[in-house]
Amino acid sequence: MRLAIINDYKNLSRSANWGQLPDDIKIDVFCDILKDTNSIIQRLQPYDIVIGGREETLFDREIIEALPNLKFAVTHGRRNPSYDLDAFRERGIPVCGTRSGFEMATVELTWALILSLAKNIPAEFAAVQKGEWGITLPVGLTGKTLGILGLGQLGAGAAQVGHALDMNVIAWSQNLTQERCDETGVTLVSQEKLFEESDFLTVHLVLSNRTRGMIGKAELESMKATAYIINTARGPIIDETALIAALKSGTIAGAGLDVFDQEPLPKEHPLRNLPNVLISPHLGGRTRENFIARYDDCVENVMSWLKQKPVRLLT
């Protein structure tokens, strides 16, 4: 039996105890990331088990149906829009995920973006490197309004930091309840007020048909001209064309973005060159601790599947 570990771009999979697996399982580790469908199929055709990363490699119906030996697959995390779970089910291939070990890393990155934008750190650092000193006037956060779109685990984590900074924290999502807001000390507002009142609006929704494109031209135009939007959730939640237009026109002050419609972000993409945008390359959950914990779960997933008792099933 052959097992492929793909997209291990920092070679951290070796930290897990793969020696627990039976001796007849041959393991290959690939650190590069393939995007071309034919290349993905050609590489993975020999394998019975594929351990994926997050969303770097597409597992759509075409690819799944072209892998005759595939019997089991694993993804990091619990949700991966790159995996066509229906196609896996139809072929009878179980897919397992990993636990939410260090998800607060995404909250940490959210606040890194907020603070960097508010304090103009990229521009100030670039100026210091050129021999200048103090070229901007940073924004204070105390008393400002933090808007949270989606008050789940990550949204609540972001709210905690906002409270610690004496910010006014408000939230909205389609299923958000007053009870949840009371639990987290957050003020429930309407969708309209969330966009109108936020000085910093941070997105913490799951990408779905309902949330895709939820933030469009109208929502962005309703925001303050001094407001910033931060997205560490999923790129397509914000209409990218509308966002670029809002940033270019000064409709909003700026954006901190960790996620995009297309990743990696194309070299000529306009977001790369806008002065009021701070970009990180989908770093949200990419901590050493997170990867190591997830690879440990991957070993457990394979062992459980071999015993015909799979855990953390997604299909």
Image (tube, grey):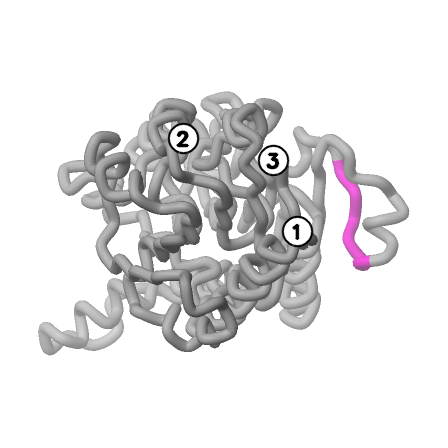
Answer with mark 1 or mark 2, whichever residue precedes in sequence: 2
Q: CA distance from mark 3 to mark 1?
A: 53 Å
Say which of 131 and 206 sits in front.
Answer: 206
Say which of 309 and 273 sits in front.
Answer: 309
Residue 256: percent from left, percent from top:
40, 51
Q: Residues within 10 Å of mark 2 (few under 14, many from 20)?
A: many
Residue 52's disc is: none
Q: Which residues are magenta?
A: 184-189
Q: Which residue is mark 2?
A: 64
Residue 221: percent from left, percent from top:
48, 27
**Which residue sits furthest left?**
130
* Kind of residue indicated by mark 1: Gln
Residue 308's disc is: 1
Q: Residue at x 60, y 36 (%)?
A: 195
Q: CA distance from mark 3 to mark 2?
A: 45 Å
Q: Which residue is mark 3?
A: 196
Q: Residue at x 66, y 29 (%)?
A: 192
